Image (tube, coloured by chain):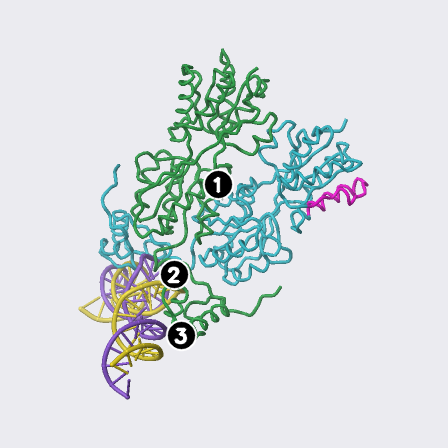
Chain colours: A green, B cyan, C purple, D yellow
Amino acid sequence: MQHGPRRPAKVTIHDVARVAGTSPSTVSRVLTGRANVRAQKREAVLRAIDELGYAPNLLARGLKTRLTYTLGLLINDIQSPFFSGAAKGAQDYAVRQGYGILLCDTGEELSLQKASLEMLRAKKVDGVIFVPTSGAEDLLPPLWEEEANLVQIDRQIEGLPISSVVVNDEEASYQAVSHLIANGYRDIAILAFEESVTTHNRRLQGYQRALDEAGISLSRTLVWRGKTSSEEGYRLTRDLLRCKPRPDALFATSSRLGVGALRAIRDAGLVIGRDIGVVVFDDIPAFSLLQPSISAIRQPAYEIGWKAAELLIRAIEAEEPLPPTQIVLPAELVIRESSAPRV
Amino acid sequence: MQHGPRRPAKVTIHDVARVAGTSPSTVSRVLTGRANVRAQKREAVLRAIDELGYAPNLLARGLKTRLTYTLGLLINDIQSPFFSGAAKGAQDYAVRQGYGILLCDTGEELSLQKASLEMLRAKKVDGVIFVPTSGAEDLLPPLWEEEANLVQIDRQIEGLPISSVVVNDEEASYQAVSHLIANGYRDIAILAFEESVTTHNRRLQGYQRALDEAGISLSRTLVWRGKTSSEEGYRLTRDLLRCKPRPDALFATSSRLGVGALRAIRDAGLVIGRDIGVVVFDDIPAFSLLQPSISAIRQPAYEIGWKAAELLIRAIEAEEPLPPTQIVLPAELVIRESSAPRV
DNA sequence: GAATGTTTTGAAATCGTTTTCAAGACCGCT
DNA sequence: AGCGGTCTTGAAAACGATTTCAAAACATTC
């Protein structure tokens, strides 16, 4: 393998200056391009940079300029298609703008979130995209005062002046449930996250509005709440199917809950889309592969991440503080076989 | 909302020193704990730190100590369950050891990989976990000379003294194909990545060994290569099913190829596990949900990431350079319905 | 060619830490 | 009290960039 000419292990701006026959100041000037330097010198500098394989030390630069070109990304579970989509969107936009992304996967654990935010603060990231957990409000002030910019995604902390990129949870849920009703389903159960998270609350509201509008009175026995895991989805659904009268449709407000529900329905010997209608909030690849395929609300995860990064970088690079912005992207109901019209 | 006492926007080690009635040197000593300081002063310092909400600036520290406590993670696609599993494993271990992770999702694009590696170099990461693409050898030397530690995952660049964490591709594939043979399948087609990547080459070798051992002569017409996307899997499989005689089984060497293949098989009106046996390398959640469920080789993605981070951090923290280590983790064949015995 | 104005340039200060070095404090001994 | 030896401490020099400031170089005009 060709290793090229031996180079000094560490080459600094001083080395470049020496080789180019000028001073570090001038090298810095051509590096940042923020002042004019005579063409002849500029070229000498560029030649030296090239020859030495010099790359500026971003730690040193960041120390001086207070800009690290690094964003923090605090999410709940990189393994979930929604979050990994958002992560990809954020990273794609960020990298295009010359920023790097520090990934923090914290689950719903507040202590890990706290530790991660402290790390991000110590590393002097320029901004943070995060998924707020209930209780996270108290973790923000330190970062906040450190003049870091913040954007929340997926969920929102109410009443805090922080930008956010979310989805129209209420409306999309309303449409999903209305769709079930239109297809002849009446006793529609809902599976939701037990903790009070904006996202799930709004999904619940949309559910309720659709029922109200159809003149169906909401029955307490149709609302099931638990952790948002597939095991929990299984348990809840199993119990729910034992109720008499048995619900004829199910709206799961997260893909994990939905996956558990599907298993439980099968194990109960019921046929999805005939014995029971199903719609899930959050589409995952498996849903289109399954037979019958599962109707789901598709969230634009990639765009959410992308927009969040865009908002964040705009705020970072703005001359003066920008007022917080709320972006609501449309989630789209993808109708498949699991919510076919009742016969 | 409670904002707590107003604090100076930026508090440095000098502020702490002033409040504690001592010098920055001493504060630094209690911070790093690498020298003894009289109990009384230490406490004064700790009180001041607490009172001011001081946290050391890791940029400044890194500049001095040449340690950033940051790792780079260079992967192909965070949206793939395999890579997101590995990312989670790596991040979980790293965060436990006080390291942060800079995420670079580059796809198979060499130019993006180059740019990302340069960024990681400029940010002075302590080490990098990466998935080598063919051609990536040339990108390494700069990092390499910069005394950054490297660990490759999933694939390997042959003949380079770099640690790696991979899976027993050859053996697992051998077992998968042997399993098909044992269940009565004879004309077993294989779908593989067209580019010469160690992973896929070894999977091909395992396939071949299983056939050899069973005395089945390998037919050129059963080996299909293309990009590793589900569209390509669909196209290849569609064409393959038109061959006469039609293969009676299919081994897909990536989950994307597998997903495409499943669609094509369905569209051809064939029943998986009866008309044609299927095993896929790399298990994804959908496979266990499908009916019939799909046999697959489960890779310990999380452990791969975890081990890679462990290896990397050990190398970083070692007094002297460690010799490169190869870790091979077992991938496990999960037998489901798609490879049921022929009747 | 001198006077003036405009670019280009380099020296030195700075960002916030750690670390070296030498001085100061403290100890136990004779 | 004086002396040799540890322990603790603070001043100052890094780390590798940017930026301010004033001097030096050049251009322009009379």
Q: Residue beneath label 1, please?
A: A302
Check if residue B224 falls in the magenta segment. Answer: yes
Relative side of A182 to A64, left or right: right
Q: Residue beneath label 3, please?
A: A22
Q: Residue beneath label 2, please?
A: A60
Q: Are marks 3 and 1 on the same chain?
A: yes
Are there few (<14), some (14-19), or many (20+) residues within 10 Å of tag 1?
A: many
User: Where does residue A292 sit, x and y in percent of width and height?
Assistant: 60, 25
* Quadrant of res B294: top right
**Residue type pointed to by label 2:** Ala
Q: Chain of mark 1?
A: A
Q: Chain of mark 3?
A: A
CA separation in Å, label 1 and label 2: 33 Å
Q: Chain of mark 2?
A: A
CA separation in Å, label 3 and label 2: 20 Å
Work out whether residue B323 or residue B293 is closer to the camera in this orientation and state it.
Answer: B293
User: Where does residue D27 sit, x and y in percent of width and height?
Assistant: 34, 77
Numbered disc 2: secondary structure: helix
Numbered disc 3: secondary structure: loop
Decide which of tag 3 and tag 2 comes sooner along the chain. Answer: 3
Work out whether residue A105 or residue B333 is closer to the camera in this orientation and state it.
Answer: A105
Image quadrant where one finds the N terminus of chain A: bottom right
**Residue type pointed to by label 3:** Thr
Decide which of tag 3 and tag 1 comes sooner along the chain. Answer: 3
Provide the residue span drawn in magenta.
B202-225
Numbered disc 1: secondary structure: helix
Residue A118 drawn above or below residue A195: below
**Residue A59, which numbered label?**
none
Q: Residue at x 34, y 60 (%)?
A: A64
Decide which of tag 1 and tag 2 comes sooner along the chain. Answer: 2
Asked if the residue under mark 2 is in contact with the one under mark 3, i.e. CB atoms within 8 Å, the reply is: no
Image quadrant where one finds the C terminus of chain A: top right
